[in-house]
Amino acid sequence: SAVISQKPSRDICQRGTSLTIQCQVDSQVTMMFWYRQQPGQSLTLIATANQGSEATYESGFVIDKFPISRPNLTFSTLTVSNMSPEDSSIYLCSVTRNTEAFFGQGTRLTVV
Amino acid sequence: QKEVEQNSGPLSVPEGAIASLNCTYSDRGSQSFFWYRQYSGKSPELIMSIYSNGDKEDGRFTAQLNKASQYVSLLIRDSQPSDSATYLCASYDNNNDMRFGAGTRLTVKP
């Protein structure tokens, strides 16, 4: 298994501001994944973060809105920029180990 | 578009019954399949993985895979109220793409 520490666990933010979510993994991993899960919905992949290169974004997600950093093999951040109420969701980071996916505790974001 | 599809439910079963959760996938290149359980407000946790055709049993859980039919299922025997959660089916292919279904919400009634 993998131990992933994600923070903050929740936040309430004003529209127009930005929030940075951090994920720390207990060991080195090549790829880290960022997901969004809206209420009652499944996981939607935002982007894949590789160390030393730019993140790869899925259709519908852009770097200006969701900038990602991956400074080393155990850490990544996702920023939700210029937030609107539509960004209210749970954000999850994930890593795979032996093809199995493990998740951080999630960040519950509410934009008011 | 590579898809993993599940019946969203809700699926309701009485305590002690067998809960049957089903999933189909569209990408024949998928090699590995997983079932995750997600309690409300929590992150998904892996409960079963299956890689080859047939059945795989772990305690009260049995995963079934049929690659010809592109079908994966999860059976939960002797269902308990604590099994009430959303169950996510996922597939993993050779391109390192993990795809999740929308999830099936299961309620086990005492």
Image: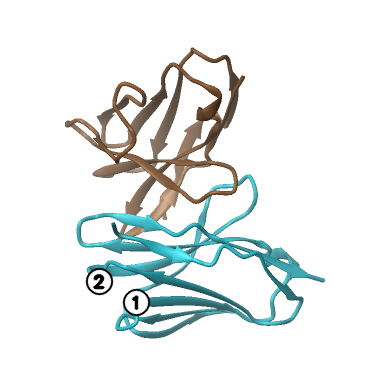
Chain colours: A brown, B cyan
| Dot placed on the residue nearer the N-terminal end, 1 or 2 | 2
Q: Are marks 1 and 2 in contact (CB under 8 Å)?
A: yes
Between B52 and B72, the one nearer to me in the picture: B72
Amino acid type of the residue that numbered disc 2 sits on in the rendered structure? Arg
Figure check: A68 above or below B96: above
Image disc number at residue B100: none
Q: Residue B52 in the image: x percent, y percent?
A: 32, 80
Amino acid type of the residue that numbered disc 1 sits on in the rendered structure? Gln
Q: Which residue is mark 2?
A: B28
Q: Which residue is mark 1?
A: B70
Q: Secondary structure at mark 2?
A: loop
Say whether residue A7 is left or right of residue A59. Answer: right
Between A94 and A12, the one nearer to me in the picture: A12
Q: Quadrant of the N terminus of chain A?
A: bottom left
Q: Residue A7 in the image: x percent, y percent?
A: 51, 30
Are the residues under badges 1 and 2 in a single subunit? yes
Q: How many numbered tags mark residues here?
A: 2
Q: Is residue B17 visible?
A: yes
Figure check: B83 above or below A70: below
Q: Tag 1: Cα neighbours inside 10 Å, few (<14), some, or many (≥20)?
A: some
Task: Choose top left, top right, bottom left or bottom right for residue B26.
Answer: bottom left
Disc 2: host chain? B
Q: Tag 2: Cα neighbours inside 10 Å, few (<14), some, or many (≥20)?
A: few
Q: Secondary structure at mark 1?
A: loop
Q: Residue A98 in the image: x percent, y percent?
A: 30, 60
Q: Residue at x 48, y 35 (%)?
A: A6
Disc 1: host chain? B
Say whether residue B8 is left or right of residue A69. Answer: right
Figure check: A88 above or below B107: above
Q: CA distance from mark 1 to mark 2?
A: 7 Å
